[in-house]
């Protein structure tokens, strides 16, 4: 077991490992990737911490307590995605039933919270059965946390799937240090109050010692909601927990492992692959979009902007190719199935309208590519189109910058991505305006090398400095565990 002194315990919906079953029926763990994992893996190893979460599969039984803790040294021997970091930590796999996968995960987390918090209130379903499942699963996560931790541990809860965990845990452990980080926007009160359970969410956040946000506007929105909630609390007297926790809200924008992207982009293999991609593209200008296939990412609107551009500027035919990497996401949720169909249709229509025998404007990759391929694509792209309709932060724009060791490339970035607060030398656009996006692409295509270099050098300086390591250090300093 890990040592008892101030261990860091991370809890998130998904574990940093997931289970795969091969053709022979053998199931084994694989390491997942992502910014949070890159950041937390080394510190958990150093402190012999614990990461609790779900493995992504439907479990036949959810009653097992306590859950066994698995030493990562026993499971990550096949792959070293994060390098050979010394030390180790434990993971605890919290079981979720098939029905809960549907209600807690697909319906409430993705169908209600994700859509509402990204301002798509018309897509947000309000449903008591799903809320009940969300409540139950959050309670289970808190119970498992209690069973595998001590009151000295520092608990760090991540993201909207687990909004209620602090509330349940505080009841079980009044003195525990509990921290929360929200990876998505915290919406304006007008939107937030649509959810009938907004008070429960706030009440739970106020059970934390700290709550972190990516952007100061999210923090302002949360403060406004708390102000109103406190008034409501006084008038209705319905709050059951003791006041007394001094909750600190803070802003700390998450970032990326700059050096990992920079070093990979400079490697001989990736440079060779970048040249290959450029040759295959066969046009002077390569444009790129990389997103989970999610309606919040503005993929449809971006495609319409490209269509508009080609209609307005016939001379650009054969001069540019747009590569869209779309990672399959939440395929069991109806809104995502509809989006996939719409994107397929728009791409078909645009390619049908403009393609010649030797040229097509849009290349669509509906799949995950390897990390090296991703970096090669980023470095090959003259222009990155990062145009979400709403995004908590957005790491893709930072990864694009870090992959341009050549100081070239233009970033077109939505004013509704959290990242806009830090990245000043991009071309900022309104993703709801097709014409605005189309003009920005035209401007990027005609930007001088000198201007591209000037902007990219500044953006790289910023992301190199404000990287994932500094993000983590800022959080841990607040928790007093550095
Ligand atoms: C949530 C918030 C916030 C994508 N395609 C491939 C691939 N990716 C990786 C990217 C990037 C990640 O996925 C996507 O991160 P984003 O930040 O853009 O978006 P979300 O998944 O929505 O993340 C977001 C984030 O949490 C962190 O707080 O920034 O606002 O919505 O890292 O590189 N990776 C590989 N192949 C792919 O094809 N290897």
Image (spheres, helix red, strand yellow):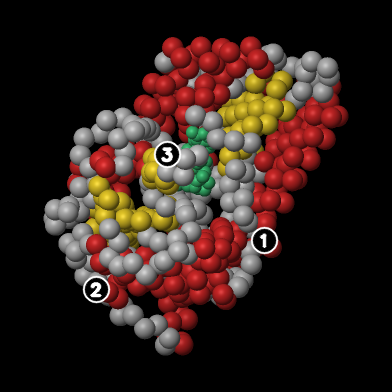
**Residue 240 percent across, percent down from the top left:** 36, 83
Q: Is residue 123 left or right of residue 186?
A: right
Q: CA distance from mark 1 to mark 2?
A: 37 Å
Mark 1, Cα crowd under 10 Å, few <14 / some 14-19 / many 20+, is: few
Q: Do the residues under discs 1 and 2 have CB atoms within 8 angstroms? A: no
Q: Residue furthest front?
A: 24
Residue 39 appears in which quarter of the rendering? top left
429 is higher (above) or lower (below) than 141? above
Q: Is residue 232 left or right of residue 243?
A: right
**Residue 60 percent across, percent down from the top left:** 45, 64
Q: Which mark is residue 115?
A: none
Say which of 98 and 54 sits in front.
Answer: 98
Q: Which residue is mark 2?
A: 174
Q: Residue at x 43, y 82 (%)?
A: 233
Q: Is residue 36 left or right of residue 339?
A: left
Residue 376 seen in the figure: yes
Earlier-in-chain disc, 3 versus 2: 3
- Give the position of the N terminus as an image quadrant: bottom left
Residue 189 seen in the figure: no
Q: Is residue 78 left or right of residue 99?
A: left
Q: CA distance from mark 3 to mark 2?
A: 34 Å
Say which of 107 and 180 sits in front.
Answer: 107
Q: Which residue is mark 3?
A: 33
The response on whether ligand 1 sits within 8 Å of label 3 is yes
Label 3 SS? loop
Q: Residue at x 20, y 47 (%)?
A: 48
Q: Which residue is mark 1?
A: 123
Is label 3 or label 1 in front?
3
């Amino acid at each position: 077991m890990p040592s008892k002194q101030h261990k860091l315990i991370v809890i998130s919906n998904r574990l940093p490992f997931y289970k795969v079953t091969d053709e022979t029926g053998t199931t084994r763990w694989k390491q997942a990737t992502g910014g949070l994992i890159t950041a937390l893996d080394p510190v958990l190893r150093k402190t012999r911490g614990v990461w609790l979460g779900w493995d992504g599969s439907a479990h036949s039984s959810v009653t097992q307590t306590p859950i066994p803790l698995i030493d990562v040294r026993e499971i990550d021997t096949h792959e070293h995605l994060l390098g050979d970091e010394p030390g180790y930590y434990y993971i605890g796999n919290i079981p979720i039933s098939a029905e809960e996968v549907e209600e807690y995960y697909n319906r409430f987390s993705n169908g209600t919270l994700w859509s509402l918090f990204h301002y798509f209130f018309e897509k947000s379903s309000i449903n008591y059965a799903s809320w009940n499942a969300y409540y139950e699963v959050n309670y289970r996560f808190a119970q498992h946390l209690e069973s595998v931790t001590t009151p000295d541990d520092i608990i760090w809860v991540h993201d909207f799937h687990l909004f209620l965990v602090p509330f349940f845990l505080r009841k079980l452990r009044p003195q525990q240090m509990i921290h929360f980080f929200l990876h998505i926007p915290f919406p304006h009160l007008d939107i937030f109050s649509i959810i009938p359970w907004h008070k429960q969410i706030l009440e739970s956040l106020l059970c934390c010692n700290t709550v972190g946000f990516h952007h100061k506007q999210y923090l302002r929105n949360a403060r406004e909601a708390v102000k109103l909630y406190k008034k409501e609390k006084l008038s209705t007297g319905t709050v059951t927990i003791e006041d007394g926790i001094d909750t600190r809200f803070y802003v700390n924008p998450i970032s990326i492992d700059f050096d990992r992207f920079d070093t990979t982009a400079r490697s001989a293999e990736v440079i060779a692959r970048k040249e290959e991609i450029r040759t295959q593209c066969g046009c002077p200008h390569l444009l790129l979009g990389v997103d989970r296939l999610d309606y919040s990412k503005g993929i449809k609107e971006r495609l319409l902007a490209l269509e508009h551009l080609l209609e307005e500027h016939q001379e650009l035919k054969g001069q540019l190719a747009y590569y869209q990497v779309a990672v399959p996401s939440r395929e069991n949720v109806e809104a995502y199935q509809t989006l996939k169909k719409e994107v397929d249709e728009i791409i078909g229509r645009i390619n049908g309208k403009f393609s010649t025998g030797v040229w097509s404007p849009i290349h669509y990759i509906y799949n995950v590519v390897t990390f090296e391929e991703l970096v090669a694509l980023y470095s090959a792209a003259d222009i990155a189109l990062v145009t979400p309709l709403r995004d908590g932060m957005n790491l893709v724009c930072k990864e694009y910058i870090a992959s341009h060791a050549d100081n070239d490339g233009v970033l077109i970035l939505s004013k509704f991505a959290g990242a806009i607060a830090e990245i000043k030398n991009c071309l900022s656009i309104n993703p709801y305006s097709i014409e605005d996006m189309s003009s920005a692409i035209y401007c990027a295509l005609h930007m001088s090398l000198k201007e591209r270099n000037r902007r990219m050098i500044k953006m790289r300086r910023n992301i190199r400095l404000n990287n994932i390591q500094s993000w983590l250090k800022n959080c841990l300093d607040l928790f007093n565990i550095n």
